[in-house]
Image: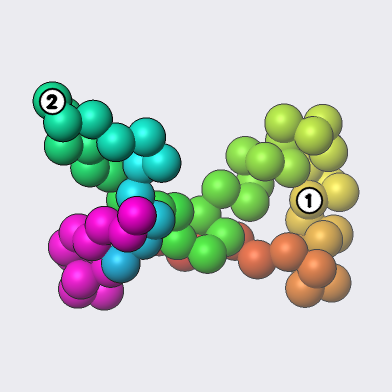
Amino acid sequence: MFTQFEHPEHGTIRTLGFPIHSACENIAPHQLPPACGEHTRATLEELRLSAQEIEALHAEQVVFQSTL
């Protein structure tokens, strides 16, 4: 049920595996998990918040934006 892979910054990461098992395939993660705050701005933009609203949330430390 669990799988692990190598992360370039954090070493070996153990995470949940794919819930459906097949004898024909070995399914592994195809991309790294996002860093904390990595998709914050994109998510807020999808929710139709304006740039000013997003900046206000950052200024008030309500949300975090990763510096990656």
User: Looking at the picture, which amino acid does disc 1 mark?
Assistant: Ile
Between the residue at mark 1 and the residue at mark 2, the CA separation in whole angstroms equals 46 Å
Chain part drawn in magenta: 1-13
Q: Residues within 10 Å of mark 2 (few under 14, many from 20)?
A: few
Using residue 50 as the reference point, say whether residue 6 is left or right of it: left
Question: Where 28 falls versus 16 (above or below)?
Answer: above
Q: Is residue 59 visible?
A: no
Residue 54 shows which numbered tag?
1
> What's the residue at 82%, 31% (across, down)?
48
Question: Where 55 falls versus 45 (above or below)?
Answer: below
Count how many numbered circles sit on residues in the image: 2
Q: Nearer the viewer, residue 28 or 32?
A: 28
Residue 19: in magenta span:
no
SS class, disc 2: loop
Q: Quadrant of residue 65?
A: bottom right
| Disc nearest the viewer among 1 and 2 | 2
> What's the residue at 84%, 47% (across, down)?
52
Residue 68: percent from left, percent from top: 40, 60
> What's the residue at 85%, 59% (across, down)?
56
Question: Where 62 falls versus 17 (above or below)?
Answer: below
Q: Is residue 61 visible?
A: yes
User: Looking at the picture, which amino acid does disc 2 mark?
Assistant: Cys
Q: Nearer the viewer, residue 12 or 21?
A: 21
The residue singled out by tag 2 in the image is 24
Display colour scheme = rainbow
